[in-house]
């Protein structure tokens, strides 16, 4: 027999009959007639105690899956094995206790299978608990439904979303929460999927706890156990209302953009990341007389003047490879065969759909031709202006010699001639003053032409204090005569990037004016300070306490050539005009405030 059998006789439980299977189980240590207690054969103490109690009470006992360290019957390797042990009391003909019958059946396979099943059951319960936690914490409604459409399970999110109590009849209420316009479609699609044994995916509107209908995405898959048909469908319901509205807004926006692109009088196109055009607006077809199919993926290049196509194509390939913006001025053929100048621009855009190019071809032929005409006229005016400057400079230079001659004749006349006239001295003084004014005017004209030529002088980083000291050194005589005090505060903007000759001219004219138009009742006080504008640009302020001037009611005061603000003071009316010209040429402007009898403040805005 494959089972182990042994008889244990008497109160000492002495070995009687022991078959081969029991011999192997007990390790061969079973001498007949010897007490079990002296030759246990690996039996545990608790089993020996139970065997003694069975003998004494006469009540049989079965120990299920009792572990033994016994050799495997197939390979003889000692390992832990399990046996069902049956203990049966033996009686003689007088029904007196005679001993025990020990019966051992190997149930190792069954026990290991049971233990594995138990472990799998524990793991299944653990995974089920984890799955339930995940499904109930995810921002989705999860559910299980059978073949008849009856809901077997729904996660708590459904109750939170719908506001229904946990006692609600799920199968009765769920269809009523679907929007009436979607209800029949949803029920039909779900029934058809269950009948076919397949999953489903559709969108519908479901009423939320606040009465608002929200778009939901329902997806489910069947639980398959081949070869049987599915009996359950497991799925999830996800709110996609915001995504759907966004997609709808994007669709409307794209339609509006296409309508806008078709409405503007420009050639609008888009291209793939590889540089192949996939869209032309309506104006492109109207302008070129070609359809989108005829234009093809490189349409705008083929429309260019043949002499420009190769360079334009190379530039486009380079921009597609590098991602640089594309821009160029080319001649493009119109539907009537005429080539017109166009500015072609394209930019790269990266979004959720990947890289794309957006381009436009703008007809600037009229502007281009007008610019050529204007450039020709500008060149002519510049040449005329240079000729006029040369003429003025030459005339002022050539007039100096006659002026010297007149002054020499006048001095000789004053030295040798006499007049019998009571107003002789006054007349002589008037002639002398006229000669001085003529000399000053000629010098101012020469200076004006010279400053005009220096307007385009190169810029450099200049130290304002150093240049101011140079200018003041040249004006030291005027400073001394006016008993002037000069205050410098240049810390706010101590340096300036400007043309040196231009800066010297501006500072010289502003300071000489401040010293020239002093008030006779007080010494001159000139304050020079730098500051920064609201946009961070440097400024210069020159403030004096002189005669002041009457300004026109004009927010933008301008000074004209030979215009004099105080006729009683000698001058040619050129200095402020030159300052204004220099500032305008550099992108700045001059601002002035003045009070007659109190003084004038000039604010130089070097740059706008």
Image (spheres, grey):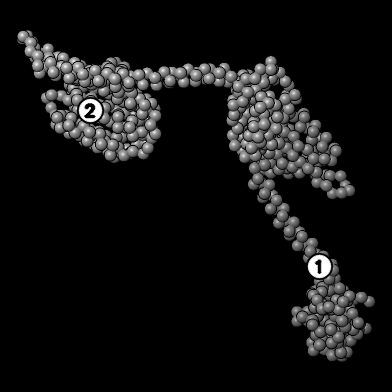
**Which element carries disc 1, helix, strand or loop?**
helix
Question: Circle 1: is it few (<14), some (14-19), or many (20+) Cα within 10 Å?
Answer: some
587 shown above or below 30: above
Q: Nearer the viewer, residue 40 or 225?
A: 225
Q: Position of residue 376 (x, y in %)?
A: 50, 19
Q: Residue at x 10, y 18 (%)?
A: 415
Depth check: 226 or 503 in front? 503
- Report the residue at 29% width, 22% height from top: 397
The spot of residue 270 in percent (x, y) is 66, 29
90 or 317: nearer the viewer: 317
Looking at the image, which residue is at 59% across and 19% down?
365
Rounded to the nearest angstrom, the CA distance separating label 1 from label 2 is: 114 Å
Could you tell whether 89 is left or right of 263 in the image? right
Q: Which residue is mark 1?
A: 112
The dot on residue 512 is 2
Q: What is the quadrant of the N terminus in the image?
A: bottom right
Q: Is residue 62 visible?
A: no
Q: Secondary structure at mark 2?
A: helix
Quarter where residue 560 is shown = top left
């Amino acid at each position: 027999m494959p089972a182990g059998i042994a008889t244990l006789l008497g109160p000492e439980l002495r070995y009687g009959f022991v078959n081969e299977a029991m011999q192997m189980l007990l390790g061969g240590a079973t001498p007949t007639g010897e007490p079990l207690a002296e030759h246990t054969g690996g039996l545990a103490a608790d089993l020996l105690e139970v065997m003694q109690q069975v003998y004494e009470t006469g009540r049989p006992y079965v120990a299920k899956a009792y572990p033994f360290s016994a050799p495997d019957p197939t390979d003889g390797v000692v390992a832990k094995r399990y046996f069902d042990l049956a203990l049966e009391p033996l009686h003689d003909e007088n029904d007196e206790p005679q001993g025990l019958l020990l019966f051992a059946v190997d149930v190792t396979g069954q026990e290991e299978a049971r233990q594995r099943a138990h472990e799998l059951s524990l793991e299944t319960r653990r995974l089920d608990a984890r799955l339930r936690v995940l499904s109930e914490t995810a921002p989705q409604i999860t559910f299980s439904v059978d073949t008849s459409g009856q809901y077997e399970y729904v996660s708590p999110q459904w109750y939170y979303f719908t506001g229904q109590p946990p006692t609600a009849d799920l199968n009765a209420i769920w269809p009523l929460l679907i929007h009436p316009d979607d209800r029949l479609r949803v029920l039909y699609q779900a029934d058809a999927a269950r009948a076919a044994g397949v999953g489903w995916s559709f969108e519908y509107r479901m009423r939320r706890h606040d009465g608002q209908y929200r778009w939901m995405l329902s997806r489910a898959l069947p639980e398959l156990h081949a070869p049987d048909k599915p009996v359950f469908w497991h799925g999830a319901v996800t709110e996609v209302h915001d995504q759907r509205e966004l997609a709808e807004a994007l669709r409307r926006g794209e339609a509006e953009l296409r309508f806008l692109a078709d409405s503007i009088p420009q050639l609008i196109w888009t291209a793939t990341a590889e540089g192949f055009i996939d869209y032309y607006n309506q104006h492109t077809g109207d302008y070129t007389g070609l359809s989108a199919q005829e234009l093809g993926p490189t349409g705008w290049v083929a429309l260019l003047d043949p002499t420009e196509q190769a360079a334009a194509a190379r530039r486009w390939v380079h921009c597609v490879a590098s991602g640089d913006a594309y821009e160029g001025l080319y001649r493009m053929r119109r539907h009537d065969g005429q080539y017109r100048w166009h500015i072609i621009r394209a930019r790269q855009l990266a979004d959720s759909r990947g890289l794309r190019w957006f381009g436009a071809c703008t007809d600037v032929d009229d502007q281009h031709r007008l610019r050529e005409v204007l450039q020709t006229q500008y060149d002519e005016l510049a040449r005329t202006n240079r000729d006029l400057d040369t003429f003025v400079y030459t005339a002022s230079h050539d007039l100096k010699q006659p002026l010297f001659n007149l002054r020499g004749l006048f001095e000789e006349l004053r030295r040798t001639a006499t007049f019998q006239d009571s107003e002789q001295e006054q007349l002589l003084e008037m002639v002398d003053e006229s000669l001085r004014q003529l000399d000053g005017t000629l010098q101012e004209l020469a200076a004006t032409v010279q400053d005009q030529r220096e307007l385009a002088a190169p810029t450099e980083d200049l130290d304002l204090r150093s240049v101011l000291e140079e200018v003041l050194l040249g004006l030291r005589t005027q400073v001394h005569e006016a008993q002037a005090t000069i205050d410098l505060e240049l810390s706010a903007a101590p340096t300036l990037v400007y043309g040196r000759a231009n800066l010297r001219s501006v500072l010289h004219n502003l300071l000489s004016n401040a010293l020239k138009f002093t008030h006779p009742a007080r010494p001159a006080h000139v304050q020079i300070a730098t500051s920064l504008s609201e946009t961070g640009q440097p400024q210069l302020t020159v403030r004096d306490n002189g005669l002041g001037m009457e300004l026109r009611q004009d927010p933008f005061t301008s000074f004209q050539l030979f215009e004099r603000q105080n006729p009683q003071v000698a001058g040619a009316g050129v200095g402020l005009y030159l300052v204004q010209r220099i500032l305008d040429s550099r992108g700045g402007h001059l601002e002035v405030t003045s009070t007659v009898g109190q003084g004038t403040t000039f604010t130089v805005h070097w740059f706008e």
